[in-house]
Amino acid sequence: MKLNKNKMLECGMVERDRQALKRQSAILCKQLVVDELLIQSLQADDILTESMAESIMAEQTSQKRSWRLLLLLPKRGPRAFSSFCSALRETEQQHLCDLLTQSPERDGRETHTDSIQPEKEPAVKTRRQERAETKRERIAGSSLPLPTQEEFAAKRARTHESMEFSLDADSPINTPVLPCTPDFYHSHCQQSYRMNSSPRGFALVISNVSFDPLAAPELDPRKGGEVDDEVLRKVFTELDYLVSVHRNLTAQDMRTCIENFCRRPEHRTVDSCVVCLLSHGVEGAVYGTDGQLLQLDWVFQSFDNAHCPLLQNKPKMFFIQACRGDEMDCGVEQIDGPARTLSPGCEQRDAGREGQGDADSRQRANLGRPRIKLPQRSDMICGFASLKGQTICTAAMRNTKRGSWFIQELNSSLRLHSRDTHLSDILVQVNGRIKEREGYAPGTAHHRCKEMSEFTSSLCKDLYLFPKYQPQY
């Protein structure tokens, strides 16, 4: 049996499928999200060995993991292509599956892309392969209404080159998430949202880094944005969320992705959800890669008590890393504050702006009695990277190596303080840290620039994540 499998793999991938991977390799390297679920799916189909899976996940960036996987697939037999497409569908990357399976004749816009350079295949260890976990259920179809497109002022054209620096700075903090203690859990769980399902919930990260130069020439690439989505993937995975990351989506693709996510039947069995949107933005909306706007009010509506009943009375967390306007916050001098040289928050290279419970069982239990009514929208908390004011909407700041200020501070606070601090107070801590920071780019408009984050909340209880604690029943 083992010999037959080896002979099958020696045959390699059929030429048509190999060419499809080759043609789209550049796009795949940029947009493909290689996470644990996708790798487990390929392992379950005997496409990847355990040592191959380990070598892929050991890569430090999402792009490098994608590159290594795409090097291996053509060598893994004639079933590798169809298994890969199936894994893409199961990990909510249908757009990439469609890209691979469409014929060149039907795609008149297809352009030549660089092929992947060959690399020696890693040696396979003689270690028994473990079967992956049961595959995820496919996403149910969605029928949420699309929002009416509101008129927004066109994003102001850039009149100067974005001042962004490649830094010799430390990577984002990766200290392990500190665990909640049993004593803390028992003393706080009664007055807090239920938070003991495993996983705690599902997390969706949409990260737009590269924008269509023809459809949106005024939107610069968000250098460092890829750091943010990887930071969020890691921290929420450690917090026991099943995280799916989608990169570089048009506004319509973002809507479809969010619709599919909020319709997931698995929300019934978990205690919360997380949605992170990272892109250029204006007040009330974020940009797709095609320069079209996605209204944030529509996003919140998609998760409200009417449109997402499986998450009723459960906390829904949103984090928006985007500008809310073009205005730069230059700061004001503190009357009795320290001199600039003593300021603890001065960034030595930071610059570069973002730019412009079971619903069915409850229903059965309430038969014959008046139903409890809920507000249309509740149990939500949203952290914004930048401030909305009465007269000014401000820009968000991003470091090209460590990522954005807001995501850096959110990551740090979640790792160090979620063990014993509820989320509202964590976001207050983030605000305090952002307030201290100051850009450093002498000779540019970004020198000594400031940023101020904020959050809004309709939470009705304390929201503790109780990391790494699982009650014993």
Image: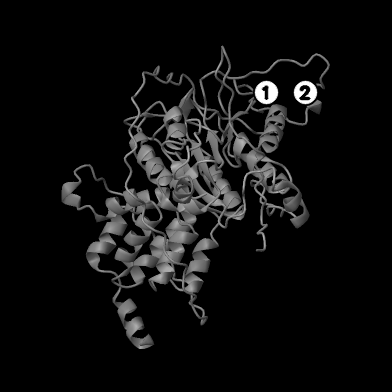
Query: Which residue, as the protein is rendered here, is positioned at the far left?
Result: 105
Residue farthest to the top? 391
- Percent position of residue 325, x then y: 51, 21
Is the C-beta separation of discs 2 and 1 under 8 Å?
Answer: yes
Disc number placed over residue 448 in the picture, else none: 1
* Mark 2 → mark 1, Cα distance in angstroms: 9 Å
Identity, as a three-letter code, of the amino acid under mark 2: Arg
Residue 404 in view, yes or no: no
Q: Is residue 85 left or right of residue 436?
A: left
Viewer-closest of 62 and 418: 418
Using the image, determine if residue 247 lies above or below residue 133. Answer: above
At a point 29% along the width and 64% down the height, the residue shown is 82
Percent position of residue 409, x then y: 66, 38
Instruction: Indicate left or right for 319 with 114 as reference.
Output: right
The quarter of the displayed image where residue 158 is located: top left
Q: Which residue is mark 2?
A: 340
The quadrant of the image that shows the N terminus is: bottom left
Q: Residue 159: image x %, image y %?
A: 46, 19
